[in-house]
Each structure stands twice: as C-alpha cells, then as structure tokens.
Image: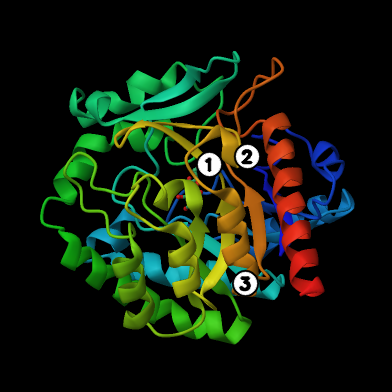
Amino acid sequence: MEMTLRWYGSKFDTVTLEQIRQIPGVTGVISTLYDVPAGEVWTQEAIHALKEEIEAAGLRLSGIESVNVHDSIKIGDADRDKYIDNYIVSLENLGKEDIHMVCYNFMPVFDWTRTELARVRPDGSTVLAYTQEAVDALVPEEMFNSIAGDMNGTVMPGWEPERMARVKELFAAYKDVDDEKLFANLKYFLECIMPVCNKYDIKMAIHPDDPAWPVFGLPRIIINKENILRMMKMVDDPHNGVTFCSGSYGTNLENDLPDMIRSLKGRIHFAHVRNLKFHSPTNFEEACHISADGNFDMYEIVKALYEIGFDGPIRPDHGRMIWGEVAMPGYGLYDRALGATYIQGLWEAIDKNAKRG
Ligand code: DNO
C-alpha cells in the first residue's frame, strides 16, 4: 500500500503540501481539479500543472478523487453520450500524465450525506454525524441550508452551492430512475470507458454510497457485498474496481467489512480507512481512527487489506476537528495525520507478524 492524504488543491485546501510532506510515511496525495464542473473535460495542461505542483513539494499525485460523473449519465438522459465522450477525453489526458487511479461515485443528487458537521464529543473534539431522524424531518431542498453554516467557509465535495440550487430540478429528473435503471446506466457508462482505461491502465474505483441505504427515496446501489459483486461481474474487467471505504460501507452494521474486502480481491484499487461510533443503527458519528473509539475492528480491516495483497493508495478518511483547527469538516490536518500513522502502525505489525510466520 501507499499512504496518501486527500488534498483539494492550493486554492481550496487549508492544509498545505509542505504539512502533508511532514506526516510520517505519507508519500502521495489524492487530488482533483476541484473547480472543473462535472461533465467538463479535464485538460492535459491543468492535470500537468497539478502534478508539477505536487511533485515540487516532494510528493506524488497518486490518484484522483474524484472525476465526477454528470447527472445525465446517471439518469440515462438523451445527452449522456456527450458527457461520456468528455469523460473519456479526461481519462485520456490523465493517462497521458501517467495517472492510473480514478475514484468516482454514482450517487444520485447528493454525494455523501451527514446531518451534523460539528457534533461535539465528550473530549471537546467535533465530528461529522448522521441521524436518520434528522433526514426524515427535512425536505431535500433544506438539506444544504441545514448544514451550510458549519462548513467553516469551505466548499464541501458534493455540496457545491450551484449543485444545491438545482436540487428540486434534479429530484424531478431522477423520478423514473430505480435501482435497476441505475445499474443499467452504470453498466453503459463503464462499457464506454473501459477501452480507454485499458489503453492507459487506469483503474476506476467506485466510491460506495454513504450512508449505505436510500436517502430521500433516491435509489442507491453501491451499498453492500451483493450489489458490489454484481457490479464487478456486470463489467468483468480488472479496471472496473472499487474504493473500499470502511466508513461508508460500515454505516450499515450488517456489512461485514473484512469479509467484503476478501471477496473483492484484485478489485480494490483505493482504500479509505476510518471508524464510526454508533449510538443506534441510524445514529452514528465519525470517531477517531483507533478501534477503541468506535464500533469497527480496525485491525481486522487492515489485516484483510494486507491479506488480499492490496497495493494501491490508502488514505485515512475524515478526521475529527481537534486542537483548535479550522478546516473543511472531516479534512483538517491533525486528526488525519494521527490516522495515517495509526494505520501504518497496524500495517507494520501485521506485516512483521506475517513474515515471521
Ligand atoms: C467524502 C468523500 C466523497 C467521495 C466521493 C467520491 O468525504 O469520501 O465525497 O470523495 O463520493 O466520488
């Protein structure tokens, strides 16, 4: 595995590349062209500039999170081919710049969903949290306003104001899209992009839906072992793979995370590792990374990744806000740095144990 940190680019991130470089063991960043709207072409020049900036700081651009998929593709609209063609050109330009991992999602309307961005924990840290009760009490259009005040002046991925302004319209556009249609539209998209992925060896890594169940009645399909294996079979190419995000699949306590990892051997191209603390099956908060703070056995999760021979980029995921830091919720420096070193400690112990037999 290669330890990385997500970085939104110098215009958008409160964390600098110099700071990331000083986190022990972190050699790469996962980045994006944050200001290119979904559906538009990523130019080779812009990708090259991003890569150069990262390399000048002594790090590697280890992959992209995300090249977002336009809603017309997810809906299966008449104009989807135009957006798929643009996506193919973006992948081609990434390939030419020697980038080989792309994370994306296929969630309708909203990306990940939380109902609180700064829930205070007993130690005074703040975390992202979710309760189904809070979602049920809201109409979708209010979702953005209900959390906008807690974004610390940042633009959160999937919660861009322009996108939220169109929520009503988007809901109407998705009205005939059920699980089967969404699967079919995903298949169509993947079949169109696999040739370019094969040509440049680009590993596509779909991010799970978070939380891993339908929200506001919208279909959500990347939620459990059965569906993800169906997706792997439906386009059976190693370039069609997954981002294994423990905190997203883990929102559903019925998902056995180490078992899911083992069943996806060879198809996990990127790993997001974090822990959750549940107060009830539909009320959880994002704990710090260590096992003792949440509900997951982080040792078993990392061990499963180790045992399947996972060798892609891995990153700590959302961190708590601690030590007075003001940053994009979930994406501050300090707690993610603690997470990165903790995951590496688990990995080293597992590796040494395995080698000693
Ligand atoms: C949230 C992230 C997601 C993820 C996208 C991938 O913090 O994990 O926004 O990047 O779903 O496209």
- The answer to whether 150 is drawn above or below residue 158 in the figure is above
Kindly tell me whether residue 31 is visible in this rendering: no
Q: Which residue is mark 2?
A: 290
In-image side of 198 versus 1 (left or right): left
Q: Residues within 10 Å of mark 2 (few under 14, many from 20)?
A: many
- How far apart in space, not on screen, are marks 2 and 1 (Cα)? 7 Å
Q: Residues within 10 Å of mark 1 (few under 14, many from 20)?
A: many
- The answer to whether 321 is drawn above or below residue 171 in the figure is above
In the image, what residue occupies the spot 71% across and 72% down?
Answer: 98
Q: Earlier in the sequence, mark 2 or mark 1?
A: 1
Q: Which residue is mark 1?
A: 275
- Image quadrant assignment for residue 328: top right
Q: Position of residue 13 (x, y in %)?
A: 67, 34
Are the residues at dot 2 and dot 1 in contact (C-beta closer than 8 Å)? yes
Q: Position of residue 178 (x, y in %)?
A: 15, 59
In the image, what residue occupies the spot 83% across and 36% down?
Answer: 19
In the image, what residue occupies the spot 59% across and 44% down?
Answer: 317
Q: Residues within 10 Å of mark 3 (few under 14, many from 20)?
A: some
- The answer to whether 89 is drawn above or below residue 216 in the figure is below
Looking at the rendered structure, the secondary structure element under dot 2 is loop
Of the pair 94 and 19, the residue shown nearer to us: 19
Q: Quadrant of the C terminus?
A: bottom right
Residue at the far front: name it: 357
- Given the image, on which type of amino acid does mark 2 rest? Ile
Looking at the rendered structure, the secondary structure element under dot 1 is loop
- Given the image, on which type of amino acid does mark 1 rest? Asn
Q: Which residue is mark 3?
A: 307
- Given the image, on which type of amino acid does mark 3 rest? Glu
Q: For residue 214, which numbered disc appears in the image? A: none
Q: Position of residue 251 (x, y in %)?
A: 38, 44
Kindly tell me whether residue 347 is visible in this rendering: yes
Q: Position of residue 21 (x, y in %)?
A: 85, 45
